[in-house]
């Protein structure tokens, strides 16, 4: 199965980049991985609600243009369903057996994810009720995908 992580924001900090790259490398025996980042619309610090909504809509268009009908779309959202690592692994197994071409996991900007992306999403998942930097979210997500594959394969991994 192909997995694509779409991070609206760019991963800038070297320590996050290193962690994400490490887990992407570890994931290669289990899945074809792709990371797309930097789709965020530039906003003025004085941006109002209308400007933010317009930016989210543009980001959403970019995301939706990348995804075909035969792909799974998962939006990471604080209001999404929280899963244990085991439940995520079971969900990943269903994705892997779904007959779809790819799983797309979207991490939004500091303003969230466009409503159109949430509407199109097959799943809304929350990593935590807490809010994290998008860079940290991508790192946590890659680690959890790796953990999920280890669980599915019955391979040992640190708890």
Image: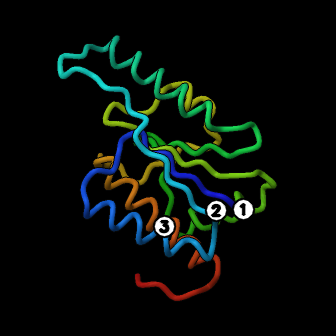
Q: Which class describes the residues within 10 Å of circle 3: few (<14), some (14-19), or many (20+)?
A: many
Q: Are marks 3 and 1 in contact (CB under 8 Å)?
A: no
Per the model, the C-alpha gap separating discs 3 and 1 is: 17 Å
Q: Quarter holding the C terminus?
A: bottom left
Mark positioned earlier in the residue sequence (3 or 1): 3
Mark positioned earlier in the residue sequence (2 or 3): 3
Q: Nearer the viewer, mark 3 or mark 1?
A: 3
Per the image, label 3 sits on a secondary structure element best described as helix
**Can you identify the residue that label 3 sits on?**
24
Please tell me whether residue 40 is drawn above or below residue 91 in the rendered image. Answer: above
Q: Residue furthest left?
A: 46
**What residue is drawn where x is 58% and y is 72%?**
28
**Can you identify the residue that label 1 sits on?**
96
Per the image, label 2 sits on a secondary structure element best described as helix
Per the model, the C-alpha gap separating discs 2 and 1 is: 6 Å
**Can you identify the residue that label 2 sits on?**
92
**What residue is drawn where x is 49% and y is 47%?**
36
Q: Position of residue 82 (x, y in %)?
A: 47, 53
Q: Position of residue 40 (x, y in %)?
A: 38, 33
Q: Position of residue 117 (x, y in %)?
A: 55, 31
Marking on residue 10? none
Q: Is residue 36 left or right of residue 72?
A: left
Q: Are marks 2 and 1 in contact (CB under 8 Å)?
A: yes
Per the image, label 1 sits on a secondary structure element best described as helix
Please tell me whether residue 6 is drawn above or below residue 147 in the rendered image. Answer: above
Q: Which class describes the residues within 10 Å of circle 2: few (<14), some (14-19), or many (20+)?
A: some
């Amino acid at each position: 199965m192909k997995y694509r992580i779409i991070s609206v924001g760019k991963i800038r900090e070297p320590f996050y980049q290193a962690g994400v790259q490490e887990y992407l490398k570890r994931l290669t025996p289990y899945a074809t991985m792709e990371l797309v980042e930097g789709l965020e619309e530039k906003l003025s610090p004085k941006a109002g609600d209308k400007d933010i909504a317009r930016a989210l809509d543009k980001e959403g268009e970019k995301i939706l243009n990348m995804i075909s009908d035969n792909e799974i779309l998962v939006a990471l959202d604080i209001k999404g369903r929280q899963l244990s690592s085991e439940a995520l692994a079971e969900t990943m197994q269903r994705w892997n057996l779904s007959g779809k071409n790819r799983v797309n996991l979207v991490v939004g900007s500091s303003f969230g994810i466009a409503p159109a992306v949430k509407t199109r999403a097959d799943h809304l998942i929350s990593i935590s009720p807490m809010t994290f930097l998008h860079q940290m979210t991508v790192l946590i997500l890659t680690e959890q995908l790796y953990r999920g594959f280890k669980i599915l394969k019955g391979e040992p991994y640190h708890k």
